[in-house]
Image: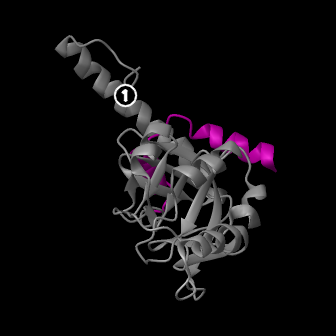
């Protein structure tokens, strides 16, 4: 099953979000897949394609104990919060090379994705992250180059605010349902989700439109005397 899915992902190699959108239209899914336009890349040029590894977070009722000292806060945060409550240890071992971490984030203005956890997920094989929540450490995330697409930027950490709820179940990115294993493609045009059972035909017609676009633009380049680049070859 994994090898078959990897073969499907290979069909999307080089396809832009625009091509995938065209492919969805071609196979009769004109109103499916396009994720809310306010979920955008952290930095220009970021792009990803992979299978969805789904995670959901929720608001937490486990608030910071009142009146604790900074030293006690350190122990509470490091040992309790990140050691027990809001740890990706609960699900990260399920990540496989080629996965995109897709997070349905609680809308509390929290930076649930940052330079640390996104890098840790990448070590385990994730090709990027898409969240309906927030991102922080934006400068480091940009420097690391691991694609992260998020709804907002935030300074806040998660402790006492949001916590892990579940993984491996359908989640929502805006009004788009994402199931484990669906194909996720993202670039400067945003994010699109392809139902895995329709992925092969979507990729076929998306490729058709990409090649048509390249041929037309290549002719324009030639008439202008421009050197051909990778976008038209």
Is residue 200 among what the camera can see? no
| Above or below, 10 relative to 190 | above
Taking depth in this image into account, of 124 and 204 the one nearest to the observer is 124
Where residue 88 appears, as percent x and y from the top left, is 69, 63
The extreme right residue here reads 1
Taking depth in this image into account, of 1 and 103 the one nearest to the observer is 103
The residue that appears at 29% across and 26% down in the rendered structure is 217
Is residue 105 among what the camera can see? yes
Question: Along the horizontal axis of the image, is 34 left or right of 55?
Answer: left
Residue 52's image quarter? Answer: bottom right
The residue that appears at 34% across and 63% down in the rendered structure is 38
Magenta span has 19? Answer: yes
Residue stretch rendered in magenta on the structure: 1-29
The total of numbered circles placed on residues is 1
Task: Name the magenta segment's main secondary structure.
Answer: helix
Taking depth in this image into account, of 169 and 27 the one nearest to the observer is 169
| Above or below, 160 relative to 186 | below
The residue that appears at 25% across and 18% down in the rendered structure is 221
Question: Along the horizontal axis of the image, is 216 left or right of 190?
Answer: left
Taking depth in this image into account, of 114 and 221 the one nearest to the observer is 114
Where residue 70 appears, as percent x and y from the top left, is 53, 72
Q: Which residue is mark 1?
A: 214
Where residue 189 appears, as percent x and y from the top left, is 35, 49
| Above or below, 34 relative to 72 | above
| Above or below, 228 relative to 22 | above
Quadrant holding the C terminus = top left
Where residue 19 appears, as percent x and y from the top left, is 43, 44
Question: Along the horizontal axis of the image, is 29 left or right of 125?
Answer: left
- Identify the secondary structure beneath mark 1: helix
Residue 222's image quarter? Answer: top left
């Amino acid at each position: 099953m994994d090898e078959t899915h990897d073969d499907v992902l290979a069909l999307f190699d080089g396809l832009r979000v625009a091509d995938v959108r065209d492919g969805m239209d071609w196979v009769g899914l004109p109103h499916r897949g396009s994720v809310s336009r306010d979920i955008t890349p952290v930095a220009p040029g970021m792009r990803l394609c992979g299978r969805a590894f789904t995670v959901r977070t929720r608001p937490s009722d486990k608030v910071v104990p009142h009146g604790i000292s900074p030293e006690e806060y350190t122990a509470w945060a490091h040992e309790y919060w990140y050691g027990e409550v809001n740890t990706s240890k609960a699900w990260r071992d399920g990540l496989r090379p080629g996965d995109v971490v897709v997070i349905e984030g609680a809308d509390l203005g929290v930076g649930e994705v940052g330079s640390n956890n996104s890098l840790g997920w990448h070590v385990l094989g994730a090709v990027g992250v898409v969240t309906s929540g927030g991102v922080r450490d934006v400068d480091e995330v940009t420097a690391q180059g691991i694609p992260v697409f998020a709804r907002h930027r935030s300074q806040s950490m998660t402790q006492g605010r949001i916590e892990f709820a579940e993984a491996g179940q359908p989640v929502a990115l805006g009004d788009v349902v994402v199931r484990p294993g669906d194909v996720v493609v993202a670039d400067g045009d945003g994010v699109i989700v392809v139902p895995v059972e329709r992925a092969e035909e979507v990729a076929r017609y998306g490729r058709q439109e990409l090649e048509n676009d390249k041929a037309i633009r290549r002719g324009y380049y030639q008439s202008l005397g421009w050197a051909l680049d990778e976008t038209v070859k």
